[in-house]
Image (cartoon, rainbow, N blue to C red):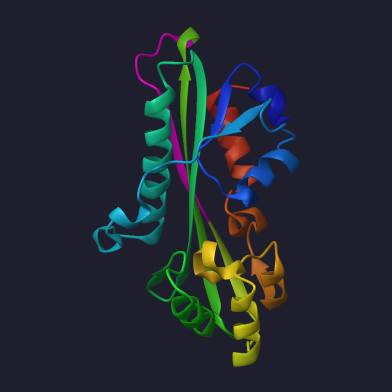
Amino acid sequence: MLRKLVDKYHVVLASQSPRRKKILIENGGLEFEKDFVIIPSTFDEKSLDKSKFETPNDFVMENSRLKAEQVFNSMKDSFDNLIVIGSDSIVVYGKEILEKPASTDEARNMLNMLSGNKHKVISGVSIYIKNTSNCASEPKLISFASETLVLFDTLSAELIEEYIETKEPMDKAGAYGIQDMGSAFVLSIEGDYHTVMGLPYQKTFAALRLALHK
């Protein structure tokens, strides 16, 4: 369905996340390098000051917007019909925003924090759309955030160390991946599974349908 929706566009995923790529292929039915390409954004996520945003949702949406914007601006003159999808995910425990751990110590602290507790995963998505046929002078921008509540099992120190040794936590917000070995820690979720993976597919599909009037 997504393939037919965007078949007249050059579609770009502004992320090198294998999870987001997998969602577009398996859920969206898109073929990599035929229906979409990956151009990772060079925007520095660390340059945004989390404390300046009223809510975590605002922060993650702005991060996704700036990622998509950087890639869109680098490509907008090369294509008449262009869609650039940017996404960012964070874990929120209490009032603390957890992004990707910068070290094994930080990963360990995050996993200890989440152990036996509930936390929120928030994924922000921003989509830039250029379509020369509608005579619009400015590209269309869609931004939204999706939240899922996750309950973690209680993790022993030994289990945390074993998980860290796999290196899996190091490129994931909150230091775990629900689609990989980290799924062993998840007792339950309330909300959208793909939000935890990093790209809320249903909301992304619905937003594109609305924006493209299909």
Pinpoint residue 90: horizontal percent, then vertical percent.
47, 61
Pinpoint residue 29: horizontal percent, then vertical percent.
75, 34
Task: Specify whether 89 is left or right of 21.
Answer: left
- Determine whether 118 is above or below 116 in the image: above
The answer to whether any part of residue 172 appears in the image is: no
Query: Foreground residue, 74 or 147?
Result: 74
Picture residue at 69% right of the left edge, 46% below the top: 22
The answer to whether any part of residue 145 appears in the image is: yes
Q: Quadrant of residue 4?
A: top right
Q: Is residue 125 magenta?
A: no
- Determine whether 197 is above or below 170 in the image: above
Part of the protein shown in magenta: 134-146
Locate the C terminus and report the quarter of the image it occupies. Answer: top right
Locate the N terminus and report the quarter of the image it occupies. Answer: top right
Task: Specify whether 143 is left or right of 167.
Answer: left
Q: Is residue 145 magenta?
A: yes
Picture residue at 39% right of the left edge, 13% below the top: 136
Pinpoint residue 57: horizontal percent, then vertical percent.
41, 56
Query: Foreground residue, 42 or 5?
Result: 42
Picture residue at 58% right of the left edge, 40% below the top: 204
Query: Foreground residue, 174 or 194?
Result: 174
Q: Quadrant of residue 195?
A: bottom right
- Determine whether 66 is above or below 2 in the image: below
Pinpoint residue 132: horizontal percent, then vertical percent.
46, 10
